[in-house]
Image (cartoon, rainbow, N blue to C red):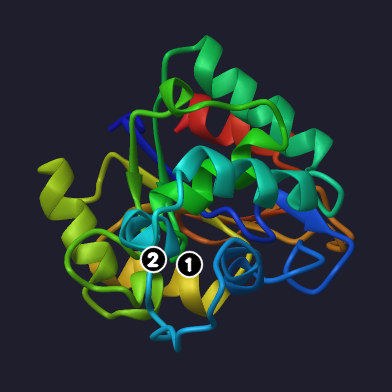
Amino acid sequence: MKIKYILVDIDGTLTSVNTKHGLEKSYAEHFYDLIDSRPELPCDVCISKILPQYGIKIEDYTKKVLADMSQHTFIRPDAQSFLRWCVENRKNLYTATTNSKYISLLKLSCGGFKEEDFTGFFGGDVFNDPLGKFSPDFYPSILKALNSDGSDVVMIGDEWIRDSEPAHKAGIKYTIHIDINAKEDCIEKEPGAFIVNSLEFAKDIIANA
């Protein structure tokens, strides 16, 4: 069966950074810069959703964060080429990450990508589970949302134990593990499980599945 749905992680899979988290300041520090107090924030809070209660316009917060992020977070050239290929070929492209949709879009915008380039967003702000792909229910929940048994899905990520392994366990037939330091361009570690050193090779895997 041909691959119908493409799931892609963001951090490390599409991005490279020159600071620990791809920012000079944290999301919380940018938030605190815009208010007169420093309220304690839960570790799983989605800051973009609490801005209105502090009288902050999301546009102001976004502008501030992006001014920082654009200097420290980058979409790798091979990832840009892969995403453009997906868009141009009208692929069903979804994020599959612990990042919320809001944070995902901030990071993707560093490579010029927009919400309309994606079919949907699976992150820590869906399924009522902020753990995102750290939750054992993450990939099963995605398959349920797609109404798929996994035979027509590929998961692309840079962490074997958070991406490829649990995706296969959930029933996703294909996985592509990106390791930019791998010596071989593309190998099939086991049936349906590929390791590539550039997302350029993901195009052929998906096209020929």
Taking the spot 42% from the left edge, 56% from the top edge, the residue there is 48
Taking the spot 23% from the left edge, 55% from the top edge, the residue there is 142
The answer to whether 99 is drawn above or below residue 159 in the figure is: above
Q: Position of residue 190 (x, y in %)?
A: 52, 64
Disc 2 designates what residue?
46
Amino acid beneath label 1: Asp
- At mark 2, the secondary structure is loop
Q: Residue furthest front?
A: 36
Q: Position of residue 95 (x, y in %)?
A: 43, 46
Q: Position of residue 71 (x, y in %)?
A: 86, 48
Residue 148 figure quarter:
top left
Q: Which mark is residue 106?
A: none
Taking the spot 35% from the left edge, 65% from the top edge, the residue there is 124
The answer to whether 18 is drawn above or below residue 29 in the figure is: above
Q: Nearer the viewer, mark 1 or mark 2?
A: 2
**Nearer to us in this view, 43 or 5:** 43
Amino acid beneath label 2: Cys
Q: Residue furthest top?
A: 88
Q: Is residue 163 left or right of residue 178?
A: left
Disc 1 designates what residue?
163
Residue 50 figure quarter:
bottom left
Picture quarter with the N terminus: top left
**Nearer to us in this view, 35 or 16:** 35
- Distance Cα–Cα, label 1 vs label 2: 23 Å
